[in-house]
């Protein structure tokens, strides 16, 4: 997994139009950040707890979106794979925090337009997880 995939996930979120597309882009964003985060979790690093918290919330956010009734048929989530090593922990934390700020905003704006209660609940839960990731990483990294 390369850091440019985090930027690509942000681009897909920005371009997504309509509830189904936002849910699909959100699911992909959570999936894309997982291996990047897991690859940089190191008990010897000062950001260990922040990165572990972010990775856990990314998995929970992805799972919340997977239960949305309007999520288009989606590929089965891939198992996290080792990252490419690109980017320091600080750079990764900053990139993921920025992605999560966008992710939380897009999900929060999509929630009120969802006709189905399950979609609204999924948007709210996933936005909450994205916000938690942002909070965990934003203070720990240069944004």
Image (tube, rainbow, N blue to C red):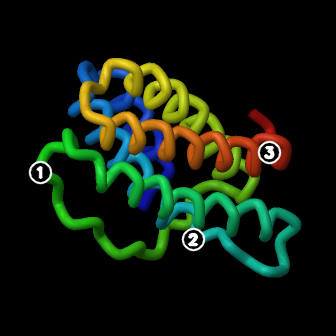
**Kind of element beneath mark 2:** helix
| 22 relative to 39, above or below | above
In this view, the mark in front (2 or 1): 1
Q: Nearer the viewer, residue 34 or 67?
A: 67
Q: Which residue is mark 3?
A: 141
Asked whether the residues under the numbered discs 1 and 3 touch, taking CB atoms below 8 Å apart as contact, a structural biologist would say: no
Mark drawn on residue 84: none
Q: Which residue is mark 1?
A: 73
Q: Position of residue 68 (x, y in %)?
A: 28, 46
Instruction: Tell me the quarter of the image containing the N terminus.
Output: bottom left
**Kind of element beneath mark 1:** loop
- Label 1 vs 3, first from the N-terminus: 1
> Residue at coordinates 48% horizontally, 45% vertically from top-left?
126
> Residue extending furthest front?
117
The quarter of the displayed image where residue 69 is located? top left
Crowding near pointer 1: few (<14 within 10 Å), some, many (20+)?
few
Q: Position of residue 136 (x, y in %)?
A: 76, 51
């Amino acid at each position: 997994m390369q850091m440019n995939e985090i930027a690509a996930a942000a681009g897909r979120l920005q371009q997504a139009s309509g509830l189904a597309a936002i849910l699909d882009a959100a699911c992909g964003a959570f999936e894309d950040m997982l291996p990047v985060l897991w690859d940089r979790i190191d008990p010897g690093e000062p950001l260990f707890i922040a990165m572990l918290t972010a990775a856990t919330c990314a998995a929970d956010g992805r799972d919340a979106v997977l239960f949305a009734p309007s999520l288009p048929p989606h590929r089965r989530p891939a198992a996290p794979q080792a990252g490419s090593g690109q980017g320091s922990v600080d750079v990764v934390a900053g990139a993921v925090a920025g992605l999560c700020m966008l992710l939380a905003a897009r999900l929060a704006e999509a929630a009120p337009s969802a006709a189905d209660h399950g979609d609204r609940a999924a948007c709210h839960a996933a936005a909450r997880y994205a916000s938690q990731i942002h909070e965990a990483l934003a203070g720990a990294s240069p944004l």
